[in-house]
Amino acid sequence: MYMPGDARRDNGIGCRGVGARGNRLDGLITGCGAAIARRKEAEGWFDVSTLKEPYRVEGKKTLGYEIAEQGGWELPDVVLYPTGGGTGLIGVWKAFAEMETLGWIGKKRPRMYSVQAAGCAPVVRAFEQGEEFAAEFPDAQTRASGLRVPRAVGDFLMLRILRESGGGALTVEDEEMIHAPGVVGATEGLFFAPEGAACLVALKKLCSLGKVSAEERVVIFNTGSGIKYLECYE
């Protein structure tokens, strides 16, 4: 198992706790993926990194089913997803297609928005430039480790989803996402991770730009607990 050198301590401790042999590498998650690719054939490993196996997308797909079920089998108008590797965004969209095939929902789809950190925004940059693929983002930096993915394997899938849905992609500054959980905590009793908090900030921006109205139904995803980011909130 590989992780970036600046990965949170709890990640390494948790992996070792279930018997994994951890290795930290200088650099970002893309370097870890490259290390796995070099060794998997020689050592007979099964690669479970993002979008290299089917099980993770199938698991993330359940998010789409939950959206439909909890909405009375009517999809919302807008979905905001914090995007690193993008497996969740891809899985949710896959679920919508499957449910239509099953006859559970109609053709309506929400406008899908990818939310990234300003310091690591390859998908946002590619979307704005009309690119099919997202080139690696140089000097990627953000305190939201789940968003610190300078190049995603499924970039072309995410960009296709954003465009097909009529949605888009936007960035949030680190300071904005770190201050936002206080609002959610006070109103909903939930302690968001910075990634999820970024979606709240992004929603406010979309509303101010007139891209989301007060009458629309919106789903934002929080992909982690603020408890794992205590150093950010001190």
Image (cartoon, rainbow, N blue to C red):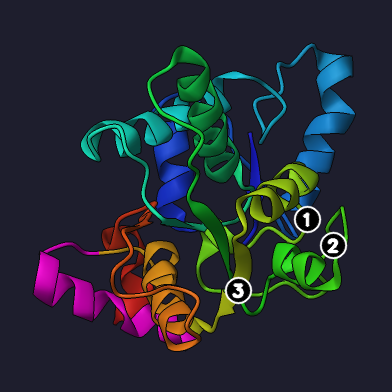
Lateral position of residue 143 relative to residue 123, left or right:
left
Among the 4 quarters of the image, the one containing residue 166: bottom right
Residue drawn at the location 76% of the way across and 49% of the way down: 155
Which quadrant would the C terminus be assigned to in this image? bottom left
User: Gap between marks 2 and 3, in whole Å?
Assistant: 17 Å
Contact between marks 2 and 1 (CB within 8 A): the answer is: yes
Q: Nearer the viewer, mark 2 or mark 3?
A: 3
Disc on the earlier residue, 2 or 3: 2
Where is residue 133? Give x, y as percent: 86, 53
Q: CA distance from mark 3 to mark 1?
A: 16 Å
Q: Secondary structure at mark 2?
A: loop
Mark 3 vs mark 1, foreground winner is: 3
Q: Which disc is residue 170 wearing? A: 3
Magenta highlight: main SS: helix
| C-alpha gap between disc 2 and disc 1 | 5 Å
Mark 2 or mark 1: whose residue is earlier in sequence = 2
Q: Earlier in the sequence, mark 3 or mark 1?
A: 1
Q: Position of residue 47 (x, y in %)?
A: 71, 23
Report which residue position mark 2 lands on.
136
Nearer to the camera, 174 or 67: 67
In front: 174, or 163?
A: 163
